[in-house]
Each structure stands twice: as C-alpha cells, then as structure tokens.
C-alpha cells in the first residue's frame, strides 16, 4: 500500500500538468475538448480509484504469487528479460480482461465508468473503477507464471502498464503513420470509446494493437464517421461513485423483476446490455438512439459552480496527497477512516455539480465527520505536527464549504444558467 501511494504522489502531478497543457492547447486551437466540470468528474473518479487501491479494498481469489509457486517451470530473476516478458503477458491479460468487460453484462459494471464521459480527453483516462472489488482474471497471467516471472516484477509492471495508457486519450493527436501498425494510438482508442454502431466493441488492446488484429476486433478510424463518445445508456450524473454502480443496480432490479428464473440467473452472463423480453417497454431506461442527435449532460452551469468545483477537486487532491505520503504514520484502522472521508467529500461536491438539493445533506455530513475526527484524535491525523493551526484551517474551509453549498442550492441553482461547460 505504502509503495503504491508513493508512486501515485509522483504520477499525479505529471497527469495534472498534461491535462492542463491539453486544456490550454485546446483553447489556443479553438478546439477545447476538456470542459472543466467533465474534467473535475474524471479526476475525482481517478481519486476514488487510487484511494481504493492504496487501501487494498479488493480481493484476488487466485494470487499470482500462488500461481508461480504451483506451476512455474522455470524461475527467472528480476532482469530486463523478466520485465519484458511481464509487460507482454500483462498486455495479453489486459486485452482479454478488457474485451470480456465489454461483452459480459456483470463485468461491464466495473468498466462503464471509464466510458461514461461524453468527451474524449486526457482527464477521462483517469475514470477508473472502484466497483472492481474482485479480480477474476489472474489466470490470464499463467504464461508469466509458467516462466517463473517473479511476483515483484508483475507488481511493478502492472501500474507502469496502466500509466502508459494515459497519453492516447486525446482528440488532438491524429493518425501516427507506421506507429498505427504496432501500438495503440489516439486514433485507435477514439474508435474504442465511440458509440457509433460502426465502432462499438472494437480496439480492446491496451499497448500493442496487434491483439485486436489477431482476434478480429480491430477497426480503423474512418474520416467519414466522426467518433461520438459516451455510453449508449448515458449516466446523466457527474458523481463518479454513482456511475460506478449504476449498471449493477439496473442488473439487480432486472433480476428481481424477472418472472423467469432462468432470466434471473442468466442476465448476469448475457451480452452487455441484455434485458429480459419486453423489459425495455415495461421498465424503460433512457438510451441514445441517434448518436448524432442527443444533448450532452450538464452543458449549462454557472461560472461560479464551475470554478468552485475545480477548487473542491484541487483541495481534495491535497488531502489525498497527505494520506498517500503518510500511510504508515496514520496506520490502521485510521487510513480507512481517512479514505471514507475522501469518498464522502467527492460524493458531496459531485452532488453539487449535479445541482442536487441533497448536496446540503452530504456537505453537512462531511462537516460532521471532520468535527468528529478532530475532536477524537485532537488533530487531523498528525498534520498539526507538520503544519501548526491546521485544525483551524481545515474547520474554517469546511465551514465555508458548507455555507457555499447552501448558497448554490438556495440561490445559484434558481438563477438562469450563466455559461456553458465548454466556456
């Protein structure tokens, strides 16, 4: 946990700088692809995912280390060769776990968050799941286990492999010549994120594009079919925690309402989006029929709300950085209390971004959590030792935030919208 937290402390500012550069470049080119509130939602999703990972809130039924101990034919040391093998096998693993997430109903729940943005930019790369609480795909790493690639090599290579998927989430890089034949490029991945019928469920590769060509899921981006982004059942919320469980909630409801016991069981394993017969009429769910004619979610917000949302996200990043940098000092079970505070924080300000009146409740709940923590521990998880008066600063900010939330719900939301998100 601690090691991964240190890695994220290094990676996070790099991602943020690149996101800001893309935003500035888009404004300069008069082709801004990164609306601020959409980016706040995306970065907030990345925060929830990283907190889940750092806290170890996931289960692996079959660990890679166990696989190596049971089936390894060779025993490689950590070397350039073992890292290359690990990277190649992880990419194979990534292709199939990614493809299955698109093809099986219950697996789609953990991946829908990544596709939920109706934009395509570097920030949306950070839309990663908290709903993936169980890892079912360790068996796909069997080739590496057979060769005896050490578990430590896999543990280092996995986050590196994930971070290398960040750069191609952009509309500003067009086709890249001969590289298109080897690596996944922005053009390939625009196809993958598109909801056009011509592009659905294509290009599942993560680093090497040849997996799609080998297994029949490749589709080149076509000049006459501009990609349209999102998911066909739009999430219609900025709240990343809600998005993480929307599809699962629909599956549970449909399984409960299904009269046929076979449907109650098989709905989980059917192709993504499948529902029992006549359910679309009996229990309709909003679906995009014409990808070229639909209204994007939340395209009107006041300038105040936009900038306040950015401020909340940046301050949350400061809280998260302190957690990641002091995991050992904060210790168990306190890191879980801290993680709960982060999740409530994101839930609260994203409810405000959705213009929900319940944002007042969630912000008040967050304020009470902070008061309880400082009252019980005496300070904010040892922060006073590093930064005197931190208690007063945190309580002052949370007080102001609560008042601001009341203002937005009671006054700002009742005023005519000021600007579009793209401004």
Image (cartoon, rainbow, N blue to C red):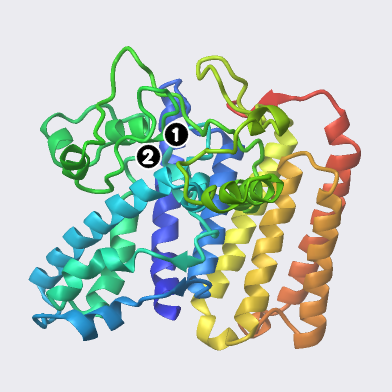
Q: Position of residue 256 (x, y in %)?
A: 69, 51
The disc placed on residue 407 is none
395, above or below 105, in the image: below
The residue located at (52%, 34%) in the rendering is 231
Q: Mark 1 sits on what residue?
A: 120
Q: Mark 2 sits on what residue?
A: 169
Q: Residues within 10 Å of mark 1 (few under 14, many from 20)?
A: many
* Sequence-first tag of 1 and 2: 1
The residue located at (58%, 26%) in the rendering is 422
Q: CA distance from mark 1 to mark 2?
A: 6 Å
Q: Residues within 10 Å of mark 2 (few under 14, many from 20)?
A: many
Residue 173 sits in quarter: top left
Circle 1 — which element?
loop
**Of residues 300 and 319, which is closer to you in this image?**
300
Q: Position of residue 196 (x, y in %)?
A: 42, 23
349, above or below 236, in the image: below
């Amino acid at each position: 946990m601690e090691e991964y937290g240190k890695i994220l402390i290094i990676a996070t500012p790099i991602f943020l700088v690149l996101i800001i550069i893309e935003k500035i470049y888009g404004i300069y080119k008069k082709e801004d692809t990164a609306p601020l509130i959409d980016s706040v939602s995306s970065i907030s999703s990345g925060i929830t995912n990283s907190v889940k990972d750092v806290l170890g809130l996931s289960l692996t039924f079959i660990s890679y280390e166990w696989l190596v101990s049971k089936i390894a034919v060779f025993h490689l040391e950590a070397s350039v060769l073992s890292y290359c093998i690990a990277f190649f096998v992880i990419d194979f693993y990534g292709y199939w776990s990614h493809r299955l997430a698109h093809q099986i109903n219950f697996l789609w729940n953990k991946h829908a968050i990544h596709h939920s943005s109706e934009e395509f930019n570097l920030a949306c790369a950070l839309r990663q799941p908290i709903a993936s609480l169980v890892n079912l795909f360790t068996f796909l790493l069997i080739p590496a286990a057979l060769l005896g690639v050490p578990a430590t090599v896999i543990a280092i290579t996995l986050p590196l492999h994930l971070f290398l998927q960040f750069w191609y989430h952009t509309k500003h890089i067009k086709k890249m010549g001969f590289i298109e034949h080897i690596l996944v490029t922005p053009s390939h991945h625009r196809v993958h994120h598109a909801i056009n019928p011509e592009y659905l469920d294509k290009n599942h590769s993560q680093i090497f594009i040849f997996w799609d060509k080998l297994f029949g899921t490749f589709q080149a981006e076509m000049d006459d079919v501009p990609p349209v982004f999102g998911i066909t059942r739009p999430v219609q919320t900025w709240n990343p925690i809600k998005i993480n469980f929307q599809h699962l909630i629909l599956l549970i409801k449909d399984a409960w309402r299904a009269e046929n016991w076979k449907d109650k069981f098989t709905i989980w394993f059917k192709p993504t989006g499948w529902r029992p017969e006549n359910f679309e009429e009996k229990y309709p769910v909003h679906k995009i029929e014409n990808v070229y004619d639909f209204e994007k979610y939340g395209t009107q917000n006041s300038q105040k709300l936009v900038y306040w949302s950015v401020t909340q996200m940046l301050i949350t990043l400061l809280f998260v950085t302190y957690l990641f940098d002091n995991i050992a000092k904060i210790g168990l079970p306190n890191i879980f209390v801290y993680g709960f505070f982060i999740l409530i924080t994101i839930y609260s300000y994203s409810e405000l971004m959705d213009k929900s009146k319940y944002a007042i409740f969630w912000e008040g709940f967050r304020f009470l959590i902070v008061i309880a923590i400082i009252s019980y521990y005496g300070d904010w998880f040892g922060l006073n030792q590093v930064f005197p008066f931190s208690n007063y600063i945190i309580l002052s900010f949370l007080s102001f935030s609560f008042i601001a939330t009341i203002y937005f719900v009671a006054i700002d939301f009742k005023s005519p919208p000021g600007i579009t998100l793209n401004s």
